[in-house]
Image: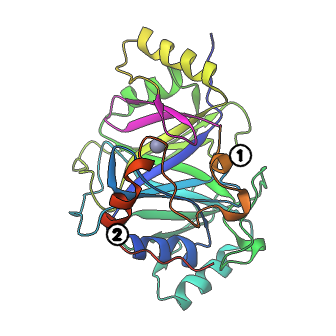
Amino acid sequence: MDVRPSGIHHVTAIAGDPQANADFYLNALGMRLVKKTVNFDSPDTYHLYYGDRAGNPGTIMTFFPWPGAPKGRIGAGQATTTSFSVPEGSIGWWQQHLASLGIAATRPAERLEEDVLSLRDPDGLVIELVASADFHDTDPWDGGRVPTEHAIRGIRAVTLTEHDLERTAGMLNGKLGFRLAAEEGNRYRFHTDEAAAGVGTVVDVIADPTAARGLVASGTVHHVAYRAPDQPTQVDWQQKLIGDGVNVTEIRDRSYFTSIYFREPGGVLLEIATDGPGFDYDEPLLKLGRSLKLPPWLEPNRAQIENALPQLKVEE
Ligand code: ZN
């Protein structure tokens, strides 16, 4: 069985204050809150999902916000940058928009022939907006603070910072089906075979043997999830990884998808998540994110869970 990735499903990071997190991703970046739920493994913490109108795989950025969480350190063995696609010609609009909100953003020289805007979220997470010509099959959110013509289209890429390029490249090439497509300085760009310009199909590896190791806490990425179209493919992928001697978890039910987890050799936690059932599994598409959703096994504790969660106000 030849298992190939069809790109990134979601990126999950750790935040501090949930209100500051929601204000940034909804108001500044113009994403949609597609699910307000709790961390299934720690239900006194929110799990907030932001994405496009329907929460399509490849557009999803999620957070575990812990008020007062200790600050992490961005470094080796981590996904150190999350890049979103915006339409070509929109970078200037974004510069003005972010400046009007007092959010600092830098526009470094073109990188691998791409126009990039670099900024940080309220917890210091590194975010990029990358101008991309491709308008893939996502469904930008038209009910937010960013005009649809400039809205984020989805996740373009993640950047992994690694001490040892070879080991990580070995897993990307061999087990995960990416191939080296470009390099510039110590940046190595890997693509999936299909739709190399599409949503979530790029992984950049920065090879930096002297970088301090990252510490996963507030302001850092917790894991990167890749897509499996369905559960049989996820099982095939799991068996292939096990056959290759990789330590993979059992399949976990995340309500909106099922998941397996494993680490790449440099230490970054990876997940394979199914495309379905999707975010309209437990509430209608029109009402995504408006009320706190819990999986069936936590529903009996709803009152207790709601009492323990911090206040969070989201404007429609
Ligand atoms: Zn995940």
Mark 2 crowd level (few <14, some 14–19, many ≥20, 10 Å Cα) = many
Mark 1 crowd level (few <14, some 14–19, many ≥20, 10 Å Cα) = some
Q: Nearer the viewer, residue 274 or 101?
A: 274
Answer whether residue 5 is magenta in the image: no
- N-terminal label among 2 and 1: 2
Query: Mark 2 = which residue?
Result: 123
Q: Which residue range is magenta in the image?
A: 252-276
Quadrant assignment, res 104: bottom left
Q: Position of residue 242 (x, y in %)?
A: 42, 13
Q: Position of residue 129 (x, y in %)?
A: 58, 65
Residue in the picture at 75% in, 71% down: 142
Residue type pointed to by label 2? Asp
Residue 290 lies, with reference to residue 196, above or below; the image says below
Quadrant assignment, res 8: top right
SS at mark 2? loop
Q: Viewer-nearest of labels 2 and 1? A: 2
